[in-house]
Image (spheres, rainbow, N blue to C red):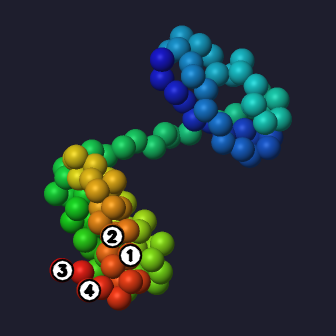
Amino acid sequence: MPIYEFRCLACNKKFELLLSITEDPENEPCPHCGAQKHQKLVSKFRRLRSEDDRIDAIADELEDMNQPESTSQMRDFIKEMGRATDDDMSEELEEMFESDLENDSSGDSPE
């Protein structure tokens, strides 16, 4: 059964309904205000990209970013980079990031 998105014409909130193709959405009330006047929306879809495309997009983002403003911003970026790979290396990259931070704070130079 497909999920359809609607916008309530009374309260203007967006909501989703799980309906069979034969069900009439007009019979379903808005979960926020109970009104039965709503408009069907065009749902978002996901564009599948290859691993190379995902990594290229992240590299472009990094280039535009210049220098990360904080370690948490860099950590988030590293996690995103790890998730972009088909093998989801976010855990391994996070461990490497933590290790480098510990080495930097203890005065050791990472090799």
Which quadrant of the figure has residue 52? bottom left
Q: Position of residue 63 (x, y in %)?
A: 28, 80
- Residue type (three-letter) at the residue carrying disc 1: Glu
* Label 2 Cα neighbours within 10 Å, binned few <14 / some 14-19 / many ≥20: few
The residue labelled by disc 1 is: 102
Q: Position of residue 13 (x, y in %)?
A: 72, 44
Q: CA distance from mark 2 to mark 1?
A: 5 Å
- Residue type (three-letter) at the residue carrying disc 3: Glu
* Label 4 Cα neighbours within 10 Å, binned few <14 / some 14-19 / many ≥20: few
Earlier residue among tags 1 and 3: 1
Q: CA distance from mark 4 to mark 2?
A: 11 Å
- Residue type (three-letter) at the residue carrying disc 4: Ser
Earlier residue among tags 2 and 3: 2
The residue labelled by disc 4 is: 109
The residue labelled by disc 2 is: 99
Image side of residue 58 versus residue 111, left or right? right
Which quadrant of the figure has residue 27? top right
Q: Tell me the residue at 19%/52% (across/down).
A: 51
Mark 1–mark 4 contact, CB under 8 Å?
no
Tell me the SS state at disc 2: helix
The residue labelled by disc 3 is: 111
Mark 2–mark 1 contact, CB under 8 Å?
yes
Image side of residue 33 versus residue 94, left or right? right
Mark 3–mark 4 contact, CB under 8 Å?
yes
Mark 4–mark 2 contact, CB under 8 Å?
no
Image side of residue 41 versus residue 64, left or right? right
Q: Position of residue 32 (x, y in %)?
A: 78, 36
Q: CA distance from mark 2 to mark 3?
A: 11 Å
Q: CA distance from mark 3 to mark 4?
A: 6 Å
* Residue 60 visible in the snapshot: yes
